[in-house]
Amino acid sequence: MRNKDDVIAVWEKDKRRKVADSDKQLFCRGCRMNHYNGQYAKQCWHLRGAKLKKREIYMSLHSVKPTAVVTLGCFIPEYH
């Protein structure tokens, strides 16, 4: 099994290349919309459509400068 660094290295070389769902799952974390997956889901309901994205996030409340990270860009905003 590959690790996150290996997947990022391949993705950085050619961002047009499709990343396998098993590799994307390495970046999957408990998101706000996780309740849609159900208790016994095998994988995230939106994993197939997810793409790797570079983002700058603040790692803590005390962070002064954002940190660049690679995450999944699969978040769908809630409808109000």
Image: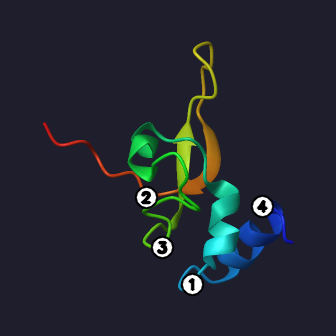
Residue for badge 2: 74
The residue sitting at 61% across, 53% down in the picture is: 28
Q: CA–CA distance between discs 3 and 2?
A: 9 Å
Residue for badge 3: 48
Q: CA–CA distance between discs 1 and 4?
A: 15 Å
The residue sitting at 64% across, 48% down in the picture is: 69
Residue type highlighted by circle 2: Cys
Q: Nearer the viewer, residue 64 or 4?
A: 4
Mark 1 neighbour density, 10 Å: few (under 14) some (14–19) many (20 or more): few
Residue for badge 4: 4
Query: Which circle's residue, 3 or 1, is located before the other in the chain?
Result: 1
**Residue 24's x, y, as percent?**
63, 66
Q: Secondary structure at mark 3?
A: loop
Q: Secondary structure at mark 1?
A: loop
Return the residue found at the far left. 80
Q: CA–CA distance between discs 1 and 2?
A: 15 Å
Q: Which mark is residue 18?
A: 1
Residue type highlighted by circle 4: Lys
Residue type highlighted by circle 1: Lys
Q: CA–CA distance between discs 3 and 4?
A: 18 Å
Q: Secondary structure at mark 2?
A: loop
Q: Quadrant of residue 52?
A: bottom right
Residue type highlighted by circle 3: Arg
